[in-house]
Amino acid sequence: MLAGAMLVWFILMGLSIAFVIWDSITNAPTSWVQRLAWILVILYTGIIGLIFYLLTCRRPFPGSHDQFTRPTWKQSVNSEMHCLAGDATGILIAASIVPTLGLTNGWDSIIEYLAGFICGLFIFQAMMMRSMYQGNYLKAVSKTFFAETVSMNMVMTGMIPAMVILTSIWPNSEAPTNATFWFRMSLATIVGGIFAYPINYWLVKNHLKHGCMTLPGKDRAAPNLGHCSHECAQNSTPHMYDSFQEKSDRMQMHSLSIVHSTLWIVGTFIILFFSLYITNKITPLHF
């Protein structure tokens, strides 16, 4: 039964990846960072990721992307993709290596957390977002540290229990040469994404993290559709320029005080540790 489920899963995953790559090339007025994030997330989450891509990011027709992605819940899903893509990539790389080290599952989880955090912050957040900070990489690291930390903690709140418990059910799933390894990591990534969504929604709603941004001038309306995206506003009427300015205002980021940001970070660590406590009751963590 498991083999049949995995076969269907991987077939749908292959079709999903093929579609999103094609769509990214032909129909995506977003940055290459956003497109890469979605490709990686769909690689890890298969048809589930594709469904959310269709619901929150893929433009229905030319000139509609900015309006389509405007709702906060859609912005939040797109924002989470940066974190989930980076964190899951680091975790998956670490999970592929740790079995060769012969460590206990507790140490495995710590290494996977660190790998996910490093990959998520220093590559998928700071490096890929540095253009928003005048190319200053260190500034990008400092500006994205808070959002990455609280989001990563919530991703791991879901992923670690899923990985540990599923490993106890499928002992052979620790080896990356086994198909169950990839199936297990896919399920764990989906669970991590579910747990991380509320904090990403809060971050985006409070302008503490960027959502989905349509590239200026890349989503021009098709002829006779009677619609123009906000991105063409700079070259259009004053009313349309106001709409463009409104979008720019919506994208302005806020910041929390050191005290408040520290409290939020500590709070997410408490939630993470509580999830590990519950996991330990089901499948003991050894150090």
Image: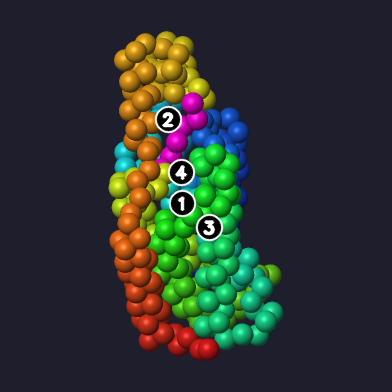
Mark 1 or 3: in front is: 1
Q: Is residue 93 above or below residue 274?
A: above
Q: Which residues are magenta?
A: 211-216
Category of crowding for the residue at label 3, using alpha-carbon neighbours closer than 10 angstroms: few (below 14), some (14–19), many (at least 20): many
Gap in angstroms between the C-alphas marked 2 and 1: 27 Å
Residue 122 percent location from the top left of the image: 57, 57
Residue drawn at x 49%, y 78% is 164
Q: Earlier in the sequence, mark 4 or mark 1?
A: 4
Residue 195 falls left or right of residue 174: left
Residue drawn at x 53%, y 76% is 110
Marks 2/1 in contact by CB < 8 Å: the verdict is: no
**In the picture, residue 69 is in which quadrant?**
top left
Residue 217 falls left or right of residue 196: right
| Amino acid type assigned to the residue bearing label 3 in the image | Leu
| Amino acid type assigned to the residue bearing label 2 in the image | His
Residue 231 percent location from the top left of the image: 44, 23
Residue 247 percent location from the top left of the image: 36, 30
Res. 116 mark: none
Task: Determine the secondary structure under disc 4.
Answer: helix
Res. 53 mark: 4
